[in-house]
Each structure stands twice: as C-alpha cells, then as structure tokens.
Image (cartoon, coloured by chain):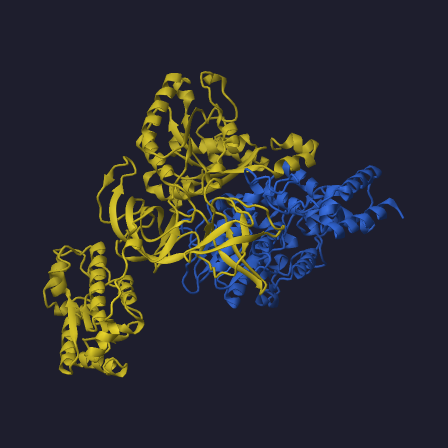
Chain colours: A blue, B yellow
Amino acid sequence: MSSIDDLIARAERLAENKKLSITTISRKLLNDGKGLSRLKAGGQCTLKTLETALAKLAEIEAAPQADRPFSASTAPASPKPNAGPSPQLSHLKRLETESIHIMREVVSEAEKPVMLYSVGKDSAVMLHLAMKAFYPSKPPFPVMHVDTTWKFREMIAFRDEWINKLGLDLIVHVNEEGVRQEVGPFTHGSQIHTDMMKTQALKQALDKHQFDVAFGGARRDEEKSRAKERIFSFRSSQHRWDPKNQRPELWDIYNTNIHKGESIRVFPLSNWTELDIWQYIYKESIPIVPLYFAKERPVVERDGTMIMVDDDRLPLKPGEKPEMRKVRFRTLGCYPLTGAVDSSAETLPEIIQEMLLTKSSERQGRMIDHDQSASMEKKKQEGYF
Amino acid sequence: MSHHAALAEQDIMAYLQAHEDKSFLRFITCGSVDDGKSTLIGRLLYDSKLIFEDQLSALESDSKKLGTQGEKIDFALLVDGLAAEREQGITIDVAYRFFSTDKRKFIVADTPGHEQYTRNMATGASTADIAIILIDARKGILTQTRRHSFIVSLLGIKNVIVAINKMDLVDYAQDVFEKIEAEYREFAKQLTFESILCIPMSALEGDNITEKSHLTDWYQGPALLPYLETVDVSSNLSDKPFRMPVQWVNRPNLDFRGFSGTIAGGAIRPGDDIVVLPSAIRSSVSRIVTYGGDLEEAGPDQAVTLTLADEVDISRGDIICAGQAPAEQTDQFAAHLLWMHEDALLPGRQYLLKTANRTVPATVTELKHKINVNTLVKQSGKTLELNEIGVCNLSTTQPIAFDNYNDNRKTGSFILIDRQSNNTIGAGMIDFSLRRAQNVHWQHLEIDKAARARQKHQKPCMLWFTGLSGSGKSTVANLVEKRLHDIGRHTYSLDGDNIRHGLNKDLGFTDADRVENIRRVGETAKLMVDAGMVVLVSFISPFASERRLARSLVEKNEFLEVYISTPLEVCEQRDVKGLYAKARRGEIKNFTGIDSEYEAPENAEIELDTSVMTAAEAAEEIVKHLEASGYLEG
C-alpha cells in the first residue's frame, strides 16, 4: 500500500469516526478541500506535502474530541464549553446571520417564494445559507435554474448532482420559444440571446409558477449602480424595476406587502463582497463548479477574450484553432459569453491569493456588461436580475 | 495589489487565518458634498487599496477630465454617483460601500446631507453602529451639523466621530479645532451620545486618516481608521435582557418544534427560563439548534432555532424574553415618528404598523408636537409632511410587545405602511407605553347588543351612503328611513347637518380633518348599532381607507356600503346648495370632485345612479336589498 493510499484510507476512517466531511479533512491536511478526492482519483503530490499531511493526520487522530471547524458558531475555540459569549461575531458570521434573517422573513411572509440558482459561486453560498436558515427543516421553497441551453456542461452536471444531494426540488426553465427559433449567441448576438433566453425566460418562469418572491444572489459591490439597490426590490406585474419607486429599508424590518401580480426580488447577499464569498466558501467547504479552478482547457482567443470550446456549437473562424491552456473562470455564464483567465490557481487558497493580487475587477470577464454602457441599469429595468 | 498583498503573497494560509476572524462595523457618514464626505470615503477605499487597477486608471483619467483637484486624484469621483442621479431624476438614496482592513470589515452608508434627505439619512443611520459627522473647519458648526447630529442621535447611535475636515485650509490651527470641539460638545449635551471623538483632519491630504499627521502634533487622539478598527460597540446589546422575536416556526416533522429568529438582545443558554409574549406562557430553553450543531450559548445578532422544555403554542409575531425581564406590552404608546412619504400623515387614519416580526393595524391618535430638525425646537402641528419628525401617540388594534427604543433598537422600532399603496410611509421609535391599555377595562354589560336587537325585533346595521355632493345621498337615505319607520323599524340618520354643527364643529375640510370627521361619525354609528338601531350615515366620505375603517368597526354583516354613483356633471348641474359654483370660482377650497379627490368604492354592497332613476326608485331598491338579505326579519 502506497503512502497516498494509506493517507486516504485513514482520512476516510477519520471522517467516519468524527462525523466530519471528507472535504473538511482534506482542507485540514492539504489546505485544499478537494485535495483528497484528487489524490484518490489518481492525482499525485510532492513528498513534502505528503509528509506534512500525514503529520497533521496523526495529530487529528490523536485529538480527544472532534473539533468541528464550522460547528457551534460562537462557541469559543477553547475546549471549555461555558467560557462565556465571544465578544464579537466575526464579519462572516454577521453576514451569514443577516442573510439567514432575510430568508426567514421571506418564507414567513411570501405566499410562494423561489430561489433562483445560477450554479455560480454566489448561488452556491446562497443555497448553503438556505440550508442553514431552516435547519433541521429543508428550505421550504424550490430552486429554479433558468437554463439558456448555452451553459458550460460542467455547470449542468454539477447542478443536477448537487441539488439532488441536498434533496431539494429543482425547476429548470428553458424558453422553448427561443429554442424553437434556435436563438443563440452566435446566430443572434449576445444581446438578443441574453434577452430571450435569460430575461424573457425568467419572466416566463415566474409567471408560469406564480412566484411572488424570488431570491437572487446579486451583491452590491458588483457594480456601481448596485450600491444603492435595496435588499427587497419591487417589480411591477410586468416585472419592471422602477428606480423611483423603491421602499426605504430601516433596521431589519422589511415591508413585504404587495398587490396581486406584483413580485419582489430579494438579495440576501447584498452586503457580501467577492472576497467575503470566497472566504466563506473556503471556511465552510462549500462545493463549487470545477470551472473555477485552473486546469488545462481548450480555448480560442477572440477579441482579446479567451473562450472555451465547451462543445461543437462554437463556430471556429478561419485560422482559429483551439489550444490547450491552463485557465479558470472568475464568473460563470453562457460559455460563449464568458471569458477565461490564465491561471495556475488549483485550490481555494490559491484562488483567493490570485484574487487579492489581481489587477482587474470581477465583471471584466462578463461580456454582457461590455455590450452597452450602463447596461446593468437598463437590463434591470427590463427585468433581468 | 491590496495592502494585504504582502501577506497574501507570502503566506496565503496565514492571511486566511487572520482574516477569517475579522470583526465588523457599520457606520454612516453625514455631511454635504462641500464638507468633503465623498473625498473621505474615496480616500478610505483608496487607502485600504480595495480599488482594482482598471478602476484606478479610470479614476486617474476621470480626475484629469472631471476632477476639481488639478493633476491630483479626485477621490470624490470614486463614490459620486449621486450628482448624476440627481440630473436623471432618480431618487437620491443611500449607497452602501464596502472596504476592509486586516482587523475589520466595514460597511459605509453614504447618504446625502441636505434637509430634504432626512429620510435617507435616517435609513442609513438605522443600521449603523457609529456616525462620522463632517464639519468644514473654515465654517464651524452649521445648521446642518445640528440636523445631522440630531438625526443620528434620534436613530439611537451612541458613538460619534466629529471629523473637523479641511484643516489644511486653516493651516492646521489648534485653536480653530479646539473652538469647534468645545462648541460641539456643548451643543451635544442635549443629545443622547455616550462618546464623542473629535479629529482634526484633511481628507484631501490624508491627514489623520490612516495614521497620525505630523502637521497636527498637538492632537493627542487617534487617527480615524485606527479608531474605527478598534472601537468596541458590541456591549450595547449583550448586556440587555434576552429577546428573540420569533420569525418562523420550524417544524420538519412531528418530533421537532423549534422557533427560529435572530437574537435581538442578551444571551441565552439551555436551561434558561423564558416567557413568551403576548401569551405570557413560561417555559425554559432546552436546545439552541443550528446547522453546525447545538450551541452552549448564543448572543446578540445570532440566527438560531430554540426548542423549549414544554409544548407551548408559539407563532410568528411572538417574542421570547428572559423569564425575569420580559418586554412590555401595550396597545397605546408614545413614539418619535419620522414621516417618509409625500402624502402627509393623517391622524386617525388606519395604517399598518410593522415591528421586527409582527404587523398590526394602527392609528396615530394624536400628534403631540413636531420637532424642527434644524433647531430641535418643538412646534405644534396637525400633520407630518415628508421628512418631518414628530412625537405622537399611537394606538394598535392588538397589543404589541416592545422595549424603549433607547434600550433596544430591534424591539423598539417599527415602520408604518399605507394600506392601499403598500408604501413604507413612516418610521417610528417607541418611547413608552401610555399605560391606558392596562388601566382601562371594558365594563362588562349584562344587556348586550343581541338583547337590545331582540327587544326591537330587528337586525341592527349601518347603511353607509357615499357619493359626491349633490348625488342624492341624503334624499335617498331620508326616503329609506321613512319606509323603514313605516314598517316599524327603529332607525337614526347621521349626516353633515346634525354632525358638522355639533359633535364635529371643530373640524374643517382639510384631508386630516376629513379623516377625523369620518372616524368620529363611524364611532358614533357603531354605538348606535350596538344600541340595536338601523343607522343611516350619509357623508361624502371620499377616501376608501376611512370607509374601510368604518366597516371594520362593526361585525361583518352589519355594514352595507351604498354607493350613490351619480356622475359629477349631473351633480354639478343640480348644484342644490350652490357649492359647485363657489368651488369653481375658488371660494371654497378642497371641494370633493373639484380640487379634492373622490375614491370610488370598488366593492359596495349596493350601487345606484340617481341620474337614471328617481330617488324613490333608489330607496325602493335599497329596501328590497335589505329584505332579501334578511335584515328586516324578526
């Protein structure tokens, strides 16, 4: 038995005994939640890494009590259970409790809420928070993905597996009219594609199921125009956002009264920043789509943006030849509209490190924003999130 | 590229460890554009290096193009979305900004400071732990300084930083700073701050922002950012008695019944005694359940699920309180109220009052006085307009549990919601219970409504005639009453003539007076229904919300809305009393249909148009309806 097999076997035993997830142990041993599963799948590591991991493993095995990294939110780190309340909640805890509060308010007051799920990292955090908010109950609402039919294949696979694992209801909505007209980013351009397959599709889905409240994962730090967005954002019966007619939000009291046919978009992650999101994913070992991690992928460079050749629907221009490059994605959307970045970040800490040292803001990889200036504002008024 | 870059680059694990347990502070900046507020926020964002290079190069080119600082970077451009918004006519609003240092994450509420934005400042202050009040060193304390200070004090902020800015323009003179500080401390004695820190500053030059400036070596206190990073605001809620407003009852299966909510004050442990309001049922906590495992103790701001030792009936809207120190309960209380809508407050009108977790109908029964936000002087008034603040008495249809706002912001606050538009129109801070709720007990009466009705052999009810002046309300009501009298029913008519000349002779025709007028009429009619009478009420009663109020006063089948829908042209043509002519000439103000709105009923039980039928026919229709609906049996 090789040392790696030994490491994996012992780690799995430890997981069983201490009721810890394998990703948590992996993080402790290798500073990487997916490290163990990668090793198990035949991956390799340096001798030095293995040595360190084995030493840490022995340490944890010897520890008398399971020290659960994200249990007992404020229970002090010292083993004494009654050491008094921690003086202050950490910033991530404060953000977490605010989001949970918002979700519980919605569930108590809405008739038929739904959580919009984009499969991205913000959605992953939002869903994790929902699992926490209603525990031991399951989140009392379905999860809905508006599928433009041009998402990365890995996103769809991840979505199906993860939602199924959590035991939640998944609604997938596709604009069938758009499919019939064969709408796509290459044939119709990114604007029409996004409008038909995303904006219109979302409206269709909300109307079809008569949802009165929809959770979305937008954050205020994403863009200047969102800095003043409310947590509860009101939409007319035509799903229009009227910037002049939004309600003041004082304390944590949210006015959820609406007329029949009107709806509310609720953003529980409003006060999170991109860094908060990554730190939380790391701290809580939240699974995310592998596309966020650097890997050799087939890409073509087009107008200064690297597009991944995810399937054979990408029409190659004369002279274009997909090349393998080590890339990752900072945001995820339709694959022809999402630019990859050169990166060697294979673990969460490396992603965070890269982000802290990077030189451009997050939405740069999103082609939809470049299309028109002030386009977010406009899209929002039209009913895009 | 951030200032964390060094650590992040060398040892990302150490960085993550250090940043996982950062604390959290929310603050608001108050000041006008000229005080350097945007420059200060821009400077904080810049100095904490949370600006990406693409944003920075945009800023540098914008500074040259649009900036006011010559070749230097104009930090204000980083945050100034507001000027553009003003031009576009979009609501000027609260913008939230984020930055963090190695010790803390900060959320900044950035609000415009002019008087017409009192509402926005209050919104930003409602969630802030600390306020920074900017003063231009050249100008000293201005009216707006007083206004900003009053609003943040009213919203319960206990720690303020007075940033005496633009010190570079007064040569960093100590005496200028000290004079302003002394004056401010004197003024602030009438407010409720617990700590005040005055800092001499130049946001533009970066003096005393991230570190102490050598240009103000006479200043002994801390620089702004180090102070923000270390100031302790956590004790405010943890020393209070335990409170948890129940948001949601958590019932995954028959074996588990938990109560989910965010702790609004104090701490709780398994075994602690609790009392539930308003039912006053007592029990003790058995578990503090969270996704990550049960807790030994939980404190303020934590979102938890409690299970109790006994099976007790608790629902959303209840508050779980410390057994020894429950919250108060009342249905009548005094509060500070900030008006947030263009439609003025109407005392007597029914609004919805929403607390942390409960919504109940409520009315402002009395506006005791208004407060001038610039001078803090009390003024008398009948209503509150947008951005005005007053002290009011309120009455709710059901008792609510509360704490004084100064003791607990979460259990002492509420918003008011308009029942028709659903807008948030007011924000309130509860001062104290009027105690009448406990002192006034209903006299138990042996002879009740049913007994009186039996004696008269009739079903009491209220016939509410509404319609424009001259539509024929009183004429028709008069004929109906005659018919009922003829068949031996006990009736009474209330109309403008017998009410406006007596009971309501103190009221005019403003919106506020109209609301009060109808409220009194409704209450009088209710007493008559209670006496077993058939009451005919004929008032224009133009507002749907007051008619709804009247309807809510009696039981479901006791209220019949009769809408006399004669069109305006016909009414004006008739003009029996010559009022329309006067209104058209401008001699009467607020005349319904001319310069005051009439909100037509949507669900009236009976609707009749006297332009297409005679008054006698209309009366006949009504009597037939009463017969068919069983009101004339017995």
Task: Answer yes or no: is residue A272 visible.
Answer: no
Seen in the picture, residue B77 relative to A233 is either above or below; the reply is above
Choose between A384 and B139: the one closer to the eye.
B139
In-image side of A231 versus A12 (left or right): left
Task: Answer yes or no: is residue B293 visible.
Answer: yes
Quadrant location, the C terminus of chain B: bottom left
User: x and y percent of residue A83 in the render?
Assistant: 60, 39
Choose between B504 and B89: the one closer to the eye.
B504
**Occupied quadrant, residue B38:** top left
User: x and y percent of residue B491 in the render?
Assistant: 16, 74
Choose between B304 and B509: the one closer to the eye.
B304
User: x and y percent of residue A380 in the render?
Assistant: 49, 53
What is the number of callouts on the image?
Answer: 0
In-image side of B457 versus B247 (left or right): left
Find the residue positioned furthest to the right: A1
Choose between A326 and B484: the one closer to the eye.
B484
Quadrant location, the N terminus of chain B: top right
Q: What residue is drawn where x is 46% and y is 18%?
A: B216
User: x and y percent of residue B339 in the render?
Assistant: 32, 48
In-image side of B588 versus A215 (left or right): left
